[in-house]
Image (cartoon, rainbow, N blue to C red):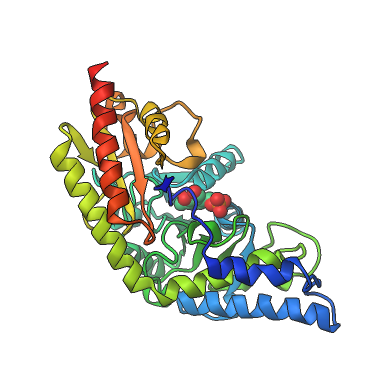
Amino acid sequence: MIYLDNAATTKMCDEAVQAMEPYLNEMYGNPSGIYNLSKMAKEIVDSARENIADAIHTKPENIFFTSGGTESDNWVLENAHNFGNHIITSSIEHHAILNKCASMEKEGMDISYIGTDREGVVNPYEIADRIRNDTALISIMFANNEIGTIQPIKEIGEIAKEYHIMFHTDAVQAFCHVPIDVENLGIDMLSASSHKFHGPKGIGFLYVREPEKMLPLIYGGGQERGKRAGTENVIGIAGMSAAVVEAMKNLDKRMKKETELRNYLINRVLREIPYVRLNGHASKRLPGNANFTIAGIDGTSLVVLMDNDGICVSSGSACSAGDDSASHVITAIGVPEQYAYGTIRITLCADNTKEEIDYTIHCLKENVRKMRSM
Ligand code: PLP
């Protein structure tokens, strides 16, 4: 099997698996206890917080563990209620943002959805134009999960600072894939999810610059300094921490390898398959992301044919798999609906090889030819 759907989820790295093992077995203490067994669990939770804080250049007390990207995103948006009646976001956000926004609109929140250019980049000046007296939050994703486009985060951070508005970024696809310095980029809140960087599923975190401004999303015990109740997912936290350390240690090397493989894939596909469009920005994109709209084919059927060849790719985002409407991201960047269904996303990781990519291109060409001849 060749796995090329790393934006949907990733294989756990050995370091994460090994780090989790003791907490599945002998180190099963509840971190809230005061005896030694508990202290061992608390130690891994504390050191994970430090490792994550280091990775984004902040302090451990600004990191809150959550169940993943969806919870972190929902928490940030729900909290906006306390600061105003208006949120600015983009039309290409993940459904963790868009569906929460839709539910808040029903409760009376005003949401401005910023469009993008044809490469999926939002214009920071358009954000500035939409700011009102009652704007509570700007929430713009760091990098898009479908087309990989990286947003002008620093410029947006500067605008948010100038107008004293909180700036959240959904960095689920970006954290541990590109360098992130929350101070330098002016980010007030950041969501991340472990299973997108070779850690376990069901664990993530939210970075908050000013935790005193956050109300809990989940009420209960005093865990996470009273901000996120519930016994900590110690096993997940241990795995996520090891995955962060591993990712950060080799970030430059992995980015370079992924970018080279991705460019090789993109160049060959554009050259060797007629009537193909690359979606997303040519260079301002995640190292491992390639997304194509191919005329005359159906993306979902192509995914099935590729699967028959032993290759896992995606026709859109995993979260909307099964949904038969055209991708909101692909249509937002101006791909006409009749072509949007012919979209395929191929997302690499540094473990993929050139041989795998060669075989993938071979199968892609063959399957597109077959589908077009039908
Ligand atoms: N945000 C983005 C950009 C994502 O890509 C995803 C998952 O695909 C999420 C949020 C949701 O993250 P999780 O699966 O951890 O809930």
Against 182, is 140 above or below? above
Residue at image coords 34%, 28%:
341
Which residue sits at x=51%, y=30%? 322
* Nearer to me, 237 or 171: 237
Quadrant housing the N terminus: top left
Q: How far across and down, in percent of the image, does residue 136 sit? A: 51, 57
Q: Is residue 343 left or right of residue 240?
A: left
Is residue 334 visible in the rendered image? The answer is no
- Residue 156, given in percent of the width and then of the height, sits at 35, 62
User: Is residue 25 in view?
Assistant: yes
- The image shows residue 370, relative to residue 312, as above or below, that is above
**Nearer to us in this view, 81 or 153:** 153
Residue located at (62% from left, 80% from top): 47
Most foreground residue, 223 or 110: 223
Locate residue 65, reporting x and y percent: 63, 66
Tell whether 70 sits left or right of 162. Answer: right
Splitting the image into 4 quarters, where does residue 362 fall?
A: top left
Image height of 285 relative to 177, above or below? above
Counting from the top left corner in percent of width and height, residue 320 is at: 49, 36
Can you say whether 213 is above or below 78 in the image? below
Residue at (81, 75) in percent of width and height: 32
Number of callouts in the render? 0
Q: Which corner quadrant holds the C terminus?
A: top left
Q: Residue furthest top?
A: 374
